[in-house]
Structure formats: structure tokens, C-alpha cells
Image (cartoon, helix red, strand yellow):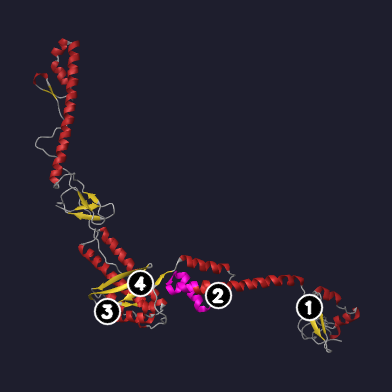
């Protein structure tokens, strides 16, 4: 018997053998009860297609017999009523024309010997056909993937998990060395591997194949322990050397490697396994950024946790209450550290203590006192500026001192300067206006005049000699 395809309300599609007894089964994904179509409660063994068709045929025959009996009873009553009423009105004609009446009752049955009508059952099963042939079942839909394709997708799922684990270890090595751009690139590769993994799992679920995966590393995980080494008591450079040495000495096998990570503020242990040395894994272990020493910090590697939102809100409110620009007064190192903590909202316990002690307890109160002093000085100077009480001191040669307020003379405009300037006499102005430069007599553009003179003798042109 072929397999039966069942759909659970959780969205899981699975198959069961056709010989499965009972009328309900349990979903392997969520554990809910799924009813088998075509089964009845209490039915111990499944029915075959022939048995189901025979049962349907019997039910249809039973219904047809009931309908035929009812129609026959109606016909008999109608015929009896006709004979009864006709016998009362015309008895002689009824006796003579009995055969004619039997022939006129068309559709009520075939007349037999003696004038008795025999009902005709249109729903009767034709002789020789004891069963009704059912239409053939529709062919099953074609499979989305072949068996080889499904097996290949299963292998790709595990290969992507191996790549995610290896890429996360390499990204943590780069983070300990403060290689920010290289770390971001590897984290993008981790996100790409995770997208491929989700796609393959979705395609396998469509064909009813479920793959069980052990916990694995993910994007954003921070390793605080690896290979039985506690990174919280080590410097970032030492932790980077441990991870780099492990990647360089890595080889495929069934050995498990333990990693203690922090994910969403919670610690968890991940066991990694690399049974195959795929081409992508070999390329990843030879990442060029692993040869860059970087600039790791000198402090101990602390555990990174989420900074309390209330602490970040207090820091933001304190700087918002100050006049603009006080945040830039911080030293460059502290300003960068504060910007990184407020943007990432994650840090170590030392970072949390630094925000409380250095920023909120020292820097912000000193900024507030300085702003208050400047505000009080401005308020004290405003009345003096309005009074304009500035005085000048003059020391004489004899040693005496004279204090007085100097007054600035009013500014003269161009119109007032022109009005106050002395005007030249008319004669001098006319003589000055007659000093013109005449062109040579033979210069182009001059027309000859009487006595060898030119009509433009007193016209000005550049470079002309002065005339008396």
C-alpha cells in the first residue's frame, strides 16, 4: 500500500505507511494528534481501495432501492385512485376500454397480462453489473526534489554550521587585536552563512525532512573561554594568540572543541565538531587577516555584558542639561570610549564602573560647576555693559594721573564729508577743464581743417600731449 501524506496544524508535513492501524497518529514535530482521513474511530485495520469502493457502492444501491420503492408506492396509489374514480363514473366504458386505459397510462409502467401495470424502476442496477466502477484516483503531484538533491541539502546544512563556527572563532581573534574593519568583514560572512543555512532548512521542511542541529556559534557571540582556557584572566593579545594557534593547527576529525561564549548577556557552552575538511573551511583557515598583529589592548579581557539602560539614560540627561560643547571637552580617549559605549550599549563591568565614577561622579559635576560660574559672571557683567561705565586713565609727565571717560566722535558719512569740503573757484575749475590732450594732425579719424589744422585738435585721447 502507498504512503499517506498528513498535514499537521503546526505546518509540518509527514508521511505514514498505509498499513498504520487506527484513525489517529501523533505529529513528530509538535506532538499533536492528527486524524487519518478515511478512517473511523474503533477501526483496527485500514481499508483497501476495493473495500472502500464496495462500501460506497452498497450505500448507493441502498439509497436507490429506497427511492425506487417510494416512487413505486406513489405510482400504485395514483393508479388505484384513477381506477377507483373512473369505475364510479363510467362502469361500462371502464370494462370495455380497460386495455385502452392501460395503454394510455404511458410512463406509469408496462402493461402485463390481465391489464395490470408493472412499475418501471429507472434506478435499478442493470443486469450483469453488480458494482459501479469508480473514476481512477488522480496521480500524485511530482516531488519537489529528488533523493540525491535532498541528501545534498542535508550536507550543505552541516557544512554551513561548520563555516559559521570557524568564521566566529576567526572574528573573535580579530576583535582581540582591534582590527575593526577585518572583524566587520568576517561578521558579514557569518551572516551570509546563516542565511544559507536558513534557506536549506526551509526547503527541506517543504518535503517533510527535518534536520536536528546541535547548538552552534552565531553572529555577535563573544568568546570568553576556549580550549580549556579562561580568557577573562588574560590580555586581549594573549587570547588572540590562543585562537590563532588553534586555527593554524586545525584539522578535520571527530574531536569536539569547547567554547564558552556570551550571547545576549547570558553565558552558554558550545561544542564544535568539524568531521570534514571542505574547500570553504580550508580557505577560511588561511584568512590573510590572521597574519596581521594589530594593536591589542593592555588591560585584562573582561566579560562583555549589556550596559543598564537606566545608566545610559542618566549619562545622556546629564550632558543634555549642560550647555552645548561640554562633551567635546573630554580627553579624546575618554570621548571615544564614551561614544563607543553609548552606541553599542555593551561593555565590561569596568566600563560600567567607569561610567558611574568618572563620568557621572567627576566629569559631569565639574562641568556643572564651571557652567554655573560662567553663568554668574555673565549675569554680573550685563548691568555694567548696559551702563557703559568704562573710564580711561592718563598719566602726565609730572606723575599725576587723570581719569576720564573718552567719547568717540560721531562717524562722518560720505555725504557730510562732501558737504564740508571747500569747493574750488569757478575760474580755477574752468582753466582745469581746458587742459585737454589733442590728437596729432595726421592721426586716423581726424579730418583736415583750414590752414593745416584738424577739426579734432581739442579732443581728448589717451597719450595726447598737453596744449597750452
Going from N to C along the chain, the mark reached first, 2 or 3, is 3
Mark 1: which secondary structure? Answer: loop
Mark 4: which secondary structure? Answer: helix
Q: Above or below — where is 277 with respect to 137?
A: below
For the stretch drawn in magenta, what is the main secondary structure? helix
Most foreground residue, 70 or 128: 70
Q: Above or below — where is 90 with respect to 76?
A: above
Left or right of 416 on screen, residue 356: left
Mark 3: which secondary structure? Answer: loop
Left or right of 312 on screen, residue 435: right
What's the distance in space between the residues labelled 1 and 3, CA to CA? 85 Å
Going from N to C along the chain, the mark reached first, 4 or 3, is 4
Quick check: can you spot residue 438? no
Of badges 4 and 3, nearer the viewer stands 3
Tag shown at residue 189: 4
Most foreground residue, 164 or 322: 322
Tag shown at residue 215: none
Q: Above or below — where is 409 with respect to 196?
A: below
Looking at the picture, how far across and down is residue 361, in whole percent? Answer: 52, 72
Q: Above or below — where is 269 with respect to 102?
A: below
In the rendered image, which residue does mark 3 sit on? Answer: 250
Left or right of 9 on screen, residue 458: right
Q: Residue visible at 31% across and 63% down?
A: 199
Q: Give the class, few, some or many, for how many residues have Cα within 10 Å of label 3's Cα (few <14, many ≥20).
A: few
In the rendered image, which residue does mark 1 sit on? Answer: 391
Looking at the picture, how far across and down is residue 252, in whole percent? Answer: 24, 76
In the image, which residues are magenta?
331-356
What's the distance in space between the residues labelled 2 and 3, CA to CA? 47 Å
What's the distance in space between the residues labelled 4 and 1, CA to CA? 74 Å
Tag shown at residue 328: 2
Q: Residue visible at 54% across and 66% down?
A: 317
Amino acid at each position: 500500500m502507498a504512503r499517506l501524506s498528513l498535514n499537521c496544524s503546526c505546518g509540518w508535513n509527514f508521511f505514514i505507511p498505509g498499513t498504520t492501524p487506527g484513525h489517529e497518529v501523533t505529529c513528530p514535530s509538535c506532538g499533536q494528534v492528527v486524524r487519518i482521513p478515511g478512517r473511523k474511530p474503533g477501526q483496527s485495520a485500514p481499508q483497501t481501495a476495493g473495500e472502500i469502493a464496495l462500501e460506497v457502492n452498497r450505500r448507493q444501491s441502498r439509497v436507490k432501492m429506497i427511492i425506487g420503492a417510494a416512487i413505486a408506492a406513489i405510482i400504485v396509489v395514483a393508479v388505484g385512485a384513477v381506477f377507483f374514480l373512473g369505475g364510479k363514473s363510467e362502469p361500462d366504458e371502464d370494462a370495455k376500454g380497460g386495455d385502452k386505459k392501460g395503454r394510455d397510462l404511458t410512463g406509469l409502467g408496462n402493461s402485463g397480462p390481465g391489464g395490470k401495470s408493472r412499475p418501471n424502476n429507472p434506478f435499478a442496477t442493470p443486469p450483469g453489473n453488480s458494482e459501479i466502477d469508480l473514476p481512477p484516483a488522480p496521480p500524485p503531484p511530482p516531488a519537489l526534489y529528488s533523493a540525491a538533491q535532498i541528501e545534498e541539502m542535508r550536507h550543505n546544512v552541516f557544512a554551513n554550521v561548520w563555516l559559521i563556527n570557524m568564521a566566529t572563532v576567526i572574528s573573535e581573534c580579530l576583535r582581540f587585536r582591534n582590527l575593526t574593519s577585518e572583524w566587520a568583514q568576517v561578521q558579514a560572512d557569518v551572516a551570509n552563512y546563516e542565511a544559507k543555512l536558513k534557506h536549506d532548512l526551509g526547503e527541506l521542511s517543504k518535503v517533510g525532512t527535518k534536520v536536528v542541529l546541535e547548538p552552534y556559534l552565531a553572529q555577535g557571540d563573544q568568546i570568553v573561554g576556549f580550549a580549556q582556557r579562561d580568557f577573562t584572566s588574560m590580555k586581549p593579545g594573549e587570547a588572540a594568540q590562543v585562537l590563532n594557534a588553534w586555527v593554524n593547527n586545525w584539522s578535520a576529525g571527530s574531536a569536539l572543541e569547547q567554547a564558552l561564549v556570551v550571547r545576549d548577556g547570558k553565558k552558554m557552552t558550545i561544542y564544535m565538531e568539524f568531521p570534514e575538511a571542505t574547500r570553504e573551511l580550508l580557505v577560511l583557515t588561511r584568512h590573510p587577516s590572521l597574519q596581521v598583529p594589530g594593536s591589542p589592548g593592555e588591560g585584562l579581557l573582561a566579560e562583555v555584558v549589556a550596559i543598564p539602560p537606566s545608566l545610559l539614560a542618566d549619562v545622556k540627561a546629564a550632558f543634555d542639561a549642560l550647555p552645548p560643547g561640554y562633551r567635546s571637552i573630554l580627553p579624546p580617549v575618554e570621548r571615544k570610549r564614551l561614544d563607543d559605549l553609548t552606541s553599542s550599549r555593551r561593555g565590561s563591568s569596568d566600563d560600567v564602573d567607569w561610567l558611574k565614577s568618572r563620568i557621572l561622579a567627576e566629569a559631569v559635576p565639574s562641568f556643572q560647576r564651571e557652567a554655573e560660574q560662567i553663568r554668574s559672571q555673565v549675569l554680573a557683567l550685563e548691568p555694567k555693559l548696559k551702563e557703559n561705565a568704562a573710564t580711561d586713565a592718563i598719566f602726565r609727565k609730572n606723575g599725576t594721573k587723570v581719569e576720564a571717560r573718552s567719547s568717540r566722535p560721531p562717524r562722518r558719512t560720505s555725504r557730510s564729508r562732501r558737504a564740508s569740503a571747500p569747493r574750488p573757484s569757478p575760474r580755477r575749475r574752468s582753466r582745469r577743464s581746458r587742459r585737454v590732450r589733442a590728437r596729432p594732425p595726421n592721426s586716423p579719424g581726424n579730418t583736415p581743417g583750414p590752414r593745416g589744422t584738424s577739426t579734432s585738435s581739442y579732443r581728448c585721447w589717451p597719450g595726447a600731449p598737453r596744449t597750452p
